[in-house]
C-alpha cells in the first residue's frame, strides 16, 4: 500500500540514496515550479492515447525506468489540484510490483504557500532498468465486475452517475454501483484527503463495509485511483480498481447499465 507522507518526510529524507521524487503533473505545470530534484513523469504517459487503456507492462517498465525508477527506488509522488495524477501513478507503480511508493498528503500549491524552495529547471534523470513483478490482487478484470459478490463504487461526479452530464453514454452507470464522487474525498487547504474520521463517516453513509469486495471505477482510471487510495489509507483490504472502467464497459452490446432513478 502506498504510504501517505507529509513535507517533513522529504525534509528528513531528501538526501537519501535511491530516493526519486516524481512530479506527476503535465510538463507545463512542472516547469512552472516543482519540488527541487523532482523528475517529471506525467501520468498521461501510462495510457494509450487512442484507447485510454493502460499500456502493456513492458512499455510501462520502460517509461518508469527512463525517469530513474527501478524496483529498489523509494518513490515519492506529488501532484496538485485534485490528486488524480498522483493516485493513478502510484497505483500503476504498485501494479508493476513496486513496493516503495509514497503519496504526498499535500499538493504542490501548499509547498509554494509555505515559501519552500521551488525549482524551475527540469531534473535530468539517470535511466534505470525497472524489473516488474505484476500484481493481480489490485486490478479488477472485466469478468470480475460482472459478478454479484463485488461492491462497485462509481467515483465519477454525481451528474455523470445520474446522467445529467453531456458525456456519453448518457444516463447510465454500472448495474448496482453506488455513487462516491472523488471530489467528496478530497481535503481542504491543498490536502489530498479529508481527515480519516470524515472519510470513515462518508464511506459508512454509502453502506460500504470493510468486509466488502470493493471495485472502484470512473471513466478510465484516474478518479477511481483516488478512491482506491482512500480505501487503502483507511485499511480496507479487499479493494481493486477497474482501470478500463466505464468507457470500456459501455462499448459492448448487451451489458447491464442502470438508469439512475430520480429521488422522490
Image (cartoon, rainbow, N blue to C red):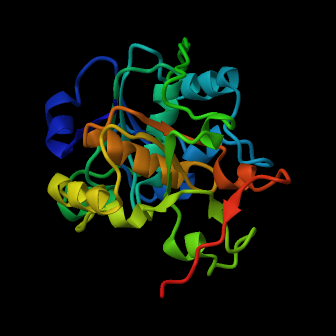
Q: Nearer the viewer, residue 26 or 224?
A: 224
Residue 40 visible in image:
no
Q: Position of residue 15 (x, y in %)?
A: 22, 25
Residue in the picture at 27% in, 41% down: 233
Vertical comparison of 127 with 231: above or below: above
Q: Position of residue 253 (x, y in %)?
A: 86, 54
Work out which quarter of the rendered image holds the N terminus and state it.
top left
In the picture, measured across the screen, residue 168 lies left or right of residue 211, that is right
Based on the displayed image, in which of its 4 quarters is residue 57 positioned? top right
Q: Residue furthest bottom?
A: 264
Please identify the quarter of the rendering in which residue 160 is found: bottom right
Q: Could you say where residue 162 lies in the image, as x and y percent from the top left?
A: 58, 75
Residue positioned 22% across, 60% down in the render: 201
- Residue at 68% of width from left, 35% of height from top? 143
Q: Please tell me which residue is depicted at 51% across the width and 41% down the height of the picture.
A: 150
Kindly tell me whether residue 131 is visible in this rendering.
Answer: yes
Place of residue 118 in the rendered image (x, y in percent of width and height, measured from the top left): 30, 52
Q: Is residue 128 above or below residue 124?
A: above
| Front position in the image: 7 or 48 | 48
125 and 173: which one is in front?
A: 173
How many numbered discs sit on the rendered protein? 0
Q: Is residue 189 above or below residue 86?
A: below
Amino acid at each position: 500500500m502506498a504510504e501517505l507522507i507529509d513535507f517533513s518526510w522529504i525534509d528528513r529524507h531528501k538526501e537519501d540514496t535511491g530516493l526519486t521524487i516524481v512530479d506527476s503533473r503535465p510538463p507545463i505545470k512542472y516547469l512552472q515550479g516543482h519540488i527541487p530534484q523532482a523528475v517529471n513523469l506525467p501520468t498521461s504517459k501510462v495510457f494509450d492515447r487512442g484507447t485510454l487503456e493502460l499500456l502493456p507492462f513492458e512499455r510501462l517498465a520502460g517509461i518508469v525506468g527512463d525517469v530513474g525508477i527501478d524496483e529498489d527506488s523509494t518513490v515519492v509522488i506529488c501532484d496538485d489540484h485534485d490528486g488524480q495524477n498522483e493516485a493513478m501513478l502510484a497505483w500503476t507503480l504498485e501494479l508493476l510490483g513496486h513496493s516503495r511508493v509514497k503519496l504526498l498528503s499535500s499538493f504542490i500549491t501548499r509547498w509554494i504557500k509555505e515559501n519552500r524552495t521551488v525549482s524551475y529547471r527540469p531534473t535530468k534523470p539517470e535511466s534505470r532498468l525497472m524489473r516488474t513483478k505484476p500484481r493481480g490482487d489490485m486490478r479488477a478484470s472485466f469478468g470480475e465486475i460482472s459478478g454479484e459478490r463485488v461492491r462497485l463504487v462509481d467515483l465519477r461526479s454525481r451528474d455523470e452517475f445520474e446522467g445529467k452530464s453531456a458525456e456519453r453514454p448518457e444516463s447510465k452507470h454500472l448495474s448496482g454501483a453506488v455513487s462516491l464522487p472523488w471530489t467528496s474525498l478530497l481535503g481542504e487547504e491543498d490536502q489530498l484527503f479529508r481527515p480519516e474520521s470524515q472519510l470513515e463517516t462518508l464511506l459508512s453513509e454509502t453502506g460500504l463495509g470493510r468486509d466488502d469486495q470493493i471495485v472502484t471505477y470512473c471513466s478510465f482510471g484516474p478518479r477511481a485511483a483516488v478512491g482506491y487510495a482512500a480505501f487503502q489509507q483507511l485499511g480496507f483490504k479487499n479493494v481493486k480498481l477497474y482501470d478500463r472502467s466505464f468507457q470500456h464497459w459501455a462499448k459492448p452490446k448487451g451489458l447491464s447499465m442502470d438508469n439512475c432513478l430520480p429521488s422522490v
